[in-house]
Image: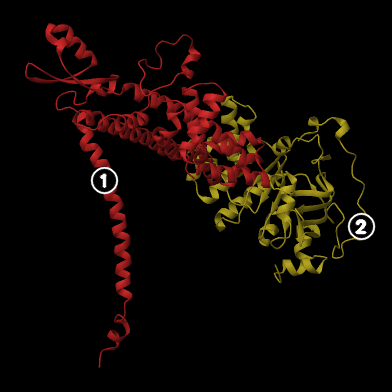
Chain colours: A yellow, B red
Amino acid sequence: MSAATLSPMERLPAPPPSSPSLAVAPVAAMSAPAADLPPSRPIIDIDHVDFFYGQSQALHDVSLRLDEKKVTAFIGPSGCGKSTLLRCLNRMNDLIDGARVAKGSIRIRGIDIHAPAVDVIELRKRVGMVFQKSNPFPKSIYENITYGLRLQGVKDKGRLDAVVEKSLRGAALWDEVKDRLHASGLGLSGGQQQRLCIARAIAVEPDIILMDEPCSALDPISTSKVEELIHELKKEFTIVIVTHNMQQAARCSDQTAFFYLGRLIEFAATRTIFMNPSNPQTEAYVSGRFG
Amino acid sequence: MTSPTATHFAPRPGLGRTWERGALWLFRVATYFIVLCGAFVFGQIFWRGAPTVFTAHAPFVNVAFFTEAPESLHVFAYQGEKMELGDRAFNAFKAAHADAGAIKDDSYVYSAGGIFPCIVGTMLLVAGSMGIALFLGVSSAIYLNEYARDSAFVRFIRLAILNLAGVPSIVFGLFGFGMFVIFFGWNVSLLAGWFTLAFMVLPVVITASEESLKAVPKGFREGSLALGATKWQTIRKNVLPYALPGILTSSILGIARVAGETAPIMFTAAYVVRDKLPWEGLEKWTDFFFQGVMALPYHIYVVSSKIPQNEYTARVQYGTAFVFLLIVALIASTSIVLRSRLRNRYKW
């Protein structure tokens, strides 16, 4: 979703600096951007979001500012709302009956993504997603990668070929599959499938890549490959990753947000969260005492 | 004293083992009985019908039976010799023999010639009604499964579809007669038959299409949508192709039923006899849709109930039934081949 898709009228003014929140008791460091990080350009601005599935509230007054070309990890025990928040960012939650953002706003590059003028299709072209369970389509590797571009009407073979190579190289998969681009994507191993999904996501050149526990079904070697890949990808993309694996968050993220029971407990540089958290709940979680 | 092994593992006294054996044999005999019944039906039709359909000499198939229209069979004695001739041959015979005018013949309708118009009619009925049923059925399955949210109204629609599946085919026939033949004024016509048969198989097609759509993993839809595909693009490119093998499977059942039902077409589309083939004598092309046709199941009904049973008529009775079975088997196996090809292309 570039600014060009909206008229200037729809663009909202920058949000007021959020005041220290008093409403949520356990929150210690909730001011955005992440504490003790050098200021960078925020690309995603989540502002006091309440989220409901039908009658049950999944997110309570969550505010976050995520920086461009950084890796942000969302951690927390199951059911804490981290995946819900991630799926808000490309409005995947629209697919669920009764799911809605009841209060607050989510802005990407200053544009409220729930504004009526925002086309969710355009939003998702800019905000790609990699899922927990790798989901290569039962098509060839080549067709998997070109899927998004073909939908946009790109037919030029030369350009598609170039994008396939670039994306596969970007996902560190090129050398493994370059000889069988027209074989089914389902013939790959689990880790390769997940990297194929990453390649497919970056083929449409999004600004942001959302990863929903991308390594939870992978073996340690495949996991380390994906983590290396994340490290490479952040040169070009803003990455938000949900993970259950705290070592993973520690290894590959720049900033970490800890959620508990639908509330943002602490958001800071990853080093701070793991070495010197300011909230006792965060400390209990990252030291493995609960969750 | 017995050894410990024997006391531990020896069968307990009682009727347990007898019941086990009894249950096994009950189910086994029931299964064999069904197979036997099926074999008897097919065997009977094959045994009695094969002499009509196949010949002892090249080309080994009774071509006339497949390519000619039904005629009356004339049985008579001429100069002490027993003759069996169809209409045309009988007329030619009478023209050729001056003394033939006095011949006393027994005639049996539909017992000579072939069943070509019936085959053509059934093929047309199947093709048209399956086209309509697949279009309407797959469309509504897509709507119900992909677009509609779960509401009381949608649940009511599903219930209605399930109930529709239980409606007897004669009721569909009467519905088609009242709706299409009378109310829409289409008369007894292909079009009326198509819609009547299509409505009859719709529940099968919708239910099975929905099942096939449900079997496509949610991840394919989410993955596609996350790449910026619209809903319809996702369905067209990343859901429907994978559901197609299952939808075709359901249409196999549908085709067998459409081809086989007599009741829905006897009021809406089928003629007992019709001289012209469907493409003959059309004044304008739209007339094609508003003509009745002969159809195999209805022809079987006519020759088995409206003409006497004897050695002269059994030929066409069993021959027609046999050809009908062959055609249904042919359609079904084509669909199965098609399905397995598609299935191999899209496996997950």
Image quarter where the N terminus of chain A lies is top right
Q: Is residue B273 above or below residue B26?
A: above
- Rendering quarter of residue B154: top right
Q: Say which residue label 1 marks.
A: B39
Image quarter where the C terminus of chain A lies is bottom right
Q: Residue at x 60, y 30 (%)?
A: A150
Q: Residue B248 location, x and y as percent?
A: 46, 37
Looking at the picture, which amino acid does disc 1 mark? Ala
Q: Is residue B275 left or right of A24 when viewed as pictured?
A: left
Which of the numbered marks, if any, corresponds to residue A20? 2
Q: Chain of mark 1?
A: B
Looking at the picture, which amino acid does disc 2 mark? Pro
Question: How packed is label 2: few (under 14 Cα within 10 Å), some, or many (20 or more)?
Answer: few
Q: Would residue A164 be seen by someone viewing this image from the given angle? A: no
| Element type at mark 2 | loop
Q: Residue A85 location, x and y as percent?
A: 75, 52
Give the foreground label among 2 and 1: 1
Toward the bottom, the furthest residue is: B1
Q: Is residue A43 above or below residue B265?
A: below
Q: Residue B11 location, x and y as percent?
A: 30, 80
